[in-house]
Image (cartoon, grey):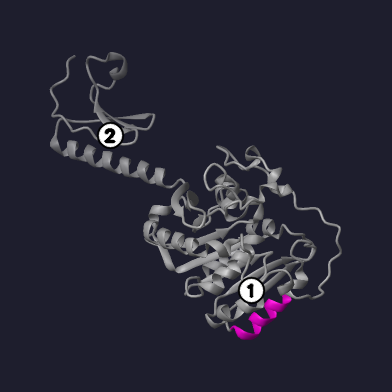
Amino acid sequence: MARSAIPPIPAARTAGFGVSWGSANDPQRTAGLAHCVVVEAGSHEFPIPHEKSWFNMKYLKLLAILLLSSFTAMAQAEPQLLRESYFSDIVGEERDYFVYLPGNFSARDEWPVLLFLHGDGERGNGKDELDFVRAQGPLYEAWVQKRDLPFVIIGPQLPMYGRDDVSYIKSRRIENIPKRLAEGVPPRPEKFPSTRPMNGSQSKSSDLISVEGYPEGWNTHDGELVGMVDTIIEKYRGDSERVYVTGLSDGGFGVWWMASKYPTRFAAANPIVGLAHPDWIDSIAAADIPVWCFAGGRDQVVPVSMFYEGMNKLEALSSADVRFTVEEDMGHDVWTRVYAGEDVYRWMLSKSK
């Protein structure tokens, strides 16, 4: 039996969503749906009975809008790992850095910002080698391990500066970078082996690093890092009162440097297996920046003995929350335990300027 003419509804289709009326010319699709509106969402079709009244037409329009909003919200609930481009005046080339957006990014007007500085082994050209940055740290935790870290995370990459012949850089392979899986998460890496006995002797940190920092380290690019933070605050709803800096190994040295040179920019600093030159401490203490530093009791790369000079000075001068944790049973890879836990993220989120 032919159906009566029904007033048309404008198409409402976005990202796989739509509303349509059955057609008498398409008997396979409309068999049994002669008095239905078909609401399409993704690959699903929902037949909804209708009557020829404008009241029901308005109801169906409202239902369509609600379903569309629901599916849009579901799409926005997925986290994103984006790339931002910038031109580096230091090396004279365009480079990219990672920006991680949490799954419920649209739900907040402002987000805490976490600047992550990688270690020496993750250097690269800022383009096809940028993926090495997500092999460690909070980017690894949020993206690869699919943890719900409530930060907009910035992940820049240091240039190579001729260090591509260093053994641990020369032997690395892009195909070995941990990947985000469609289902589940990959196993975590084994911790570094160490047979060195634990000890707490002291030595001078200035024996390891100069007051000028490393000529090929994060201190060389500090202005660019601040520019990235400013971009993210403006473009991705960053909260300027809750900007944190964390980093491992060379990135740990970079954390101390950034906190000392830009003490008004950060709400907290979290250096891991990276120490401070004593002369960097004064500005950090004067700004009362909370600091939680980590070292490895068996670390032969940055020995724990060299941390005490700077940490004791900071504790004496600062009225902020200053913490120093030594993971006595671990070598240089202390960051694997720190970033895999919850404490340091909760601690940072408890701080604001």
Query: Looking at the image, is mark 1 or mark 2 earlier in the sequence?
Result: 2
Which numbered circle lies on residue 211? 1
In the drawing, does residue 102 fall left or right of residue 38?
right
Point out residue 107 in the picture as x, y percentages from the top left corner: 39, 55
Image label count = 2
Is 161 drawn above or below residue 263 in the view shown?
Answer: above
Residue at 56%, 74% in the rendered image: 260
- Position of the N terminus, as image quadrant, is top left
Q: Which residues are magenta?
A: 308-318
Q: Quick one: SS at disc 1?
A: loop
Q: How crowded is the residue under tag 1: few (<14 C-alpha within 10 Å), some, or many (20+)?
A: few
The mark closer to the camera, 1 or 2, is: 1
Q: Are marks 1 and 2 in contact (CB under 8 Å)?
A: no
* Mark 2 residue type: Arg
In-front residue for pair 274/54: 274
* Mark 1 residue type: Val
Point out residue 284 in the picture as x, y percentages from the top left corner: 56, 77
Point out residue 265 in the picture as x, y percentages from the top left corner: 47, 71
Residue receiving disc 2: 13
In the drawing, does residue 87 fall left or right of residue 9?
right
In-front residue for pair 137/221: 221
- Quick check: can you spot residue 189? no
Residue at 22%, 31% in the rendered image: 50
- The image quadrant of residue 195 is bottom right
Residue at 71%, 74% in the rendered image: 206
